[in-house]
Image (spheres, rainbow, N blue to C red):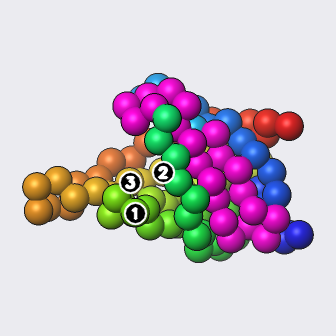
Amino acid sequence: MSDFAFAGKSFEIRLDNGVVFFNSYGPEGNRLLYEEVDGVAESGSEEVELSVGEVAKGIYLLGWNEVSGATVSQVLDFNKGTVTGYWSVDAGGKRTGEVRSGVFREVK
């Protein structure tokens, strides 16, 4: 198991736009299975490879690419239980993105 605080664990993530995810991380912290359980793409899910860096004690930067072409970056702050994310998608031949914030809690 990895030293990453999220490795081998599952979390509910609630964003400021009402979207809720259930994220399960692999034991080494380099894989993520996300499931959108409430929101625009409810029932959407995918397993992705993660790039991870610890930017400060208990604060992690995670990034991944989705099959849809979306790129996602998240900062998980285990000191405060907060998440800040950036999503970038193709919108008619141009990239568009948005920043969202929220909270997360571990789910047993």
Q: Is residue 68 left or right of residue 9?
A: left
Query: Helix, strand or loop at disc 2?
Result: strand
* Amino acid bearing label 3: Trp
Up-down relation of residue 58 to residue 102 (above or below): below
Q: Residues within 10 Å of mark 1 (few under 14, many from 20)?
A: few
In the rendered image, residue 93 lying in the magenta stretch gets the answer no
Q: Quadrant of the C terminus?
A: top right
| First in residue order: circle 1 vs circle 3 | 1
Image spot of residue 30 (x, y percent): 68, 71
Residue sitting at x 74%, y 67%: 29
The three-letter amino acid code for the residue at tag 2 is Gly
- Cα gap from disc 1 to disc 3, whole angstroms: 14 Å
The residue that mark 3 highlights is: 87
The mark lying in front, picked from 1 and 3, is 1
Q: Label 3: few (<14), some or many (≥20) within 10 Å?
A: some
Q: Which residue is mark 1?
A: 67
Farthest-out residue, right = 1
Mark 1 and mark 2 in contact? Answer it, CB < 8 Å. Answer: no
Instruction: Using the rendered image of the protein, determine whether residue 55 is visible from the camera's viewpoint.
Output: no
Q: Is 79 in front, or is 49?
A: 49
61 to 82, vertically: above or below: below
Residues drawn in magenta: 22-42
Residue on which disc 2 sits = 85
Residue type marked 1: Val
